[in-house]
Image (cartoon, rainbow, N blue to C red):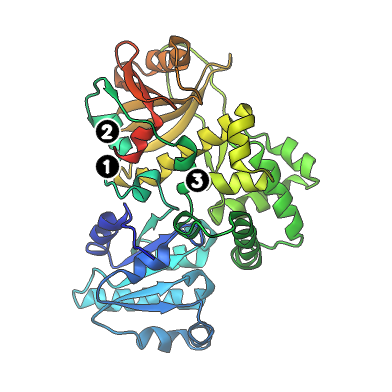
Amino acid sequence: MKYFKRGLEAYLQKTIDSRPLVYLNGPRQCGKTTLAQNYKNGNYVSFDSPINLSAAKEDPANFIQSLPQKKLNILDEVQTAPEIFPYLKMKIDERRKNGDNTGLYLLTGSANLMALPRLSEALVGRMSVLTLYPFSSCEIKSAEDNFILKFFENEFEYKSYKNYDVLGMIQNSTFPEPALNSAIDRTQWYSDYLNTLLQRDIRSIADIRNPSKVIMLLSVLAMRAGGLLNNNQTAQEIGLDIKTYERYKTAAINTFIIFEIPAWAKPNNINKRFTKASKLFFTDTNLAAYLLKRDINDIYANDRNVMGHLFENFIATEIIKNAFLMPNLEVSHFRTSDQKEVDFVLEKDGKVVGIEVKLNSSPSAHDFGGLKILKEAVGKRFKRGIVIYTGKDIVPFGDDFWAVPVCFLNGV
């Protein structure tokens, strides 16, 4: 299978060159192992191997001591072997005293660091954490541009693109295996993927007594993708008490199935009140469609309301997949108490870019209403307001406002 260069590669290498330990986390099957194995001159150890896992758990001190001293040791799926964490700390501190402080260990895991307190507590101050996601639309096209950087730094001008396949962009921006193998039965693949998550990752980080309730939770959340989340209402709908619901939802976040984008809540100059509720999204839009028990082709052709939510979910995933080049980037959503909204607010170094998402091929001035209110709220910090839509032309809609076709995210 062809190797696709990942956008995170250069940033990962830079981090390895400057830090003793890097923890590369992200969803299962997103390409972490492939990326790690592609690292030259590394010593690769997988804890998916029963013998490696057993050895590390039985005698973690000796296991760490046995690793090569002159290579970057790559420890894959490290969340299954928490016993080694204190000995990694001791080894790093020992080698630091000898002036060896960079490129010692690369750990990978399918669980968020917040779900691994033994790792974070043992190695605080000694590691950097990076996240790899499924393919972005730019990566699948083997392009290296980052649309977020363009939104902040580039000057815009009118441009017309050729016809492109909107649904194809969404379908290909997924996990490497279904993206690259057209023969795969995607329905079966996503079913197997969820079963693996339930039996391995989620079970390992949370006390899940009723796995069927997790699937029910995810199915209900899929119907709310891109929307404001009412946790109490959702818990009641599923039949869970609020504490159990929060624990299950946190497990889904910590295994990168879902993520939340917080509400924008900054001082403003228009005396507006804003909603405090977060918006929920799925890390993979195709997985969200699977949980709806519907064919995304049928949704795209016949249900524009649901497809509108999935389209917004797709843009949310593209934002988080491309945010690695801007580590101080803040992402939020903007909604006033009288329902004026902007789907995404990006803030970096005092500059603000607003993004509104519209599943139509011909935007109007009305679509920029929320962006104009955002501009008024942030004042001189406002850099640009963007409406991402499904047409072909980059078109100005007044000072600092542009309609941008979604194919722009491909790096074209």
Q: Residue at x 62, y 65 (%)?
A: 196
Vertical side of 76 occupied by 281: above or below: above
SS for dot 3: helix
Q: Whole-percent x and y of residue 27?
A: 50, 57
Question: What residue does disc 2 label?
Answer: 150
> Quick check: 44 above or below 389?
below
- Mark 3 or mark 2: name the one nearer the start of the chain: 2
Residue nearest the viewer, comparing 350 with 362 = 362
Q: Decide which of tag 2 and tag 1 comes sooner along the chain.
A: 1
For the residues marked 3 and 1, what is the alpha-carbon distance in whole angstroms?
A: 20 Å
Query: Does label 3 or label 1 sit earlier along the sequence?
Result: 1
* Label 2 with label 1: CB-CB less than 8 Å: yes
Tell me, yes or no, if residue 248 can be seen here.
yes
Q: Answer with left or right where residue 61 lies relative to residue 235.
A: left
**Residue tagged 1:** 145
Q: Quadrant of the N terminus?
A: bottom left
Q: Real-space Cα distance between discs 3 and 2? A: 24 Å
List x then y, in percent, for residue 367: 47, 15
Q: Nearer the viewer, residue 290 or 95?
A: 290
- Front one among 293 and 375: 293
Q: Which amino acid lies under the numbered mark 2 shown in the image of this protein?
A: Lys
For the C terminus, the quadrant is top left
Return the residue at label 3.
Answer: 171
